[in-house]
Image: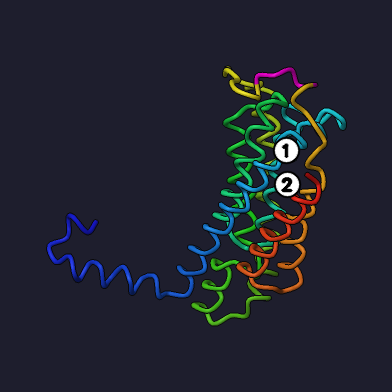
Amino acid sequence: VIVLAKDRSAACEAMIAGVQDRTLTVMIFAFLGAGVFGQLLVASGLVETIVWLGNLTGVRGTSFVLLVFLIAAVVSTSIGTSTGTVVTSVPVLFPAGIVLGANPALVLGAIYSGARFGDNLAPISDTTIASAFTQGAEVGEVVASRIKYALAAGGCSLLLYAIAGIGLGSGDYEIAGDLAMPTGDFAQPKALWMLLAPAMTIGLCVRGRSLIHALWYGIFSAIVIGLVAG
């Protein structure tokens, strides 16, 4: 953008002014924090643990797609950002879904759909707050008025993902790298304790802590848990 601008100094000043916007700043910090958090969870072996849980409980294929939607909806409703939910969830849930026989496109769609569900409904979401302030309404009133629509849309989404999952099957793809190992060798419960880190983040958000605060507490707890658990 700066290269194409006629006045590059003005373009730079406009970028700085944009970053000064509180909503945009929160989104940037949330994106960075969620990216670090997601990579920590992947490096710890959480993908293998989710595969292990899927094998243990029998949640595979289309059932896993539906579970992914619910997980993303709960996470995004708790932390109030669809971007943070997607960045955190995709590195963990997408490869696990492939190993568990779910259609890759549907897994990605379910993550994004669930993320949008919470972003539309969460009381700490910038979308909810902006719509309330611009319309002169209370945030609680906005959330209450949206619940019935969000639940109806969520129910329809689950139904459509179930139908699409049955119709499309697992899809045609090749598994490479560690994912190509036999599932029994690949799936390990070693990172089960790491689930406490995102649980802490969600819990802090539910208790009213800021998203940035909750994300960085989750990052720190993930580092500590990973070191202690090996």
Is residue 27 left or right of 79 when viewed as pictured? Answer: left
Task: Assess whether mark 2 and mark 1 are in contact (beta carbons under 8 angstroms).
Answer: yes
Where is residue 91? Give x, y as percent.
60, 40
Residue at point 75%, 40% (across, down)? 67
Is residue 190 left or right of 44 when viewed as pictured? Answer: right
Within 10 Å of the Cα at label 2, are there few (<14), some (14-19), or many (20+) other Cα atoms? many
Q: Is residue 93 magenta?
A: no
Spatial CA distance of label 1 from label 2 is: 6 Å
Residue identifier under label 1: 66
Residue 223 location, quadrant: bottom right
User: For this rendering, which residue is in front, 6 or 166?
Assistant: 6
In which quadrant of the rendered image does the C terminus lie? top right
Residue at point 71%, 67% (across, down)? 205
Query: Could you tell me which secondary element the residue under label 2 belongs to?
Result: helix
Residue identifier under label 2: 70
Type of the residue with mark 1 = Leu
186 over 84 or under it: above or below: above
Q: Tag on residue 164?
A: none
Residue 132 location, quadrant: bottom right
Where is residue 73? Give x, y as percent.
68, 52
Where is residue 198? Give x, y as percent.
73, 55
71 over 173 or under it: above or below: below
Residue numbers of the magenta segment: 180-184
Residue at point 74%, 25% (across, down)? 186
Type of the residue with mark 2 = Leu
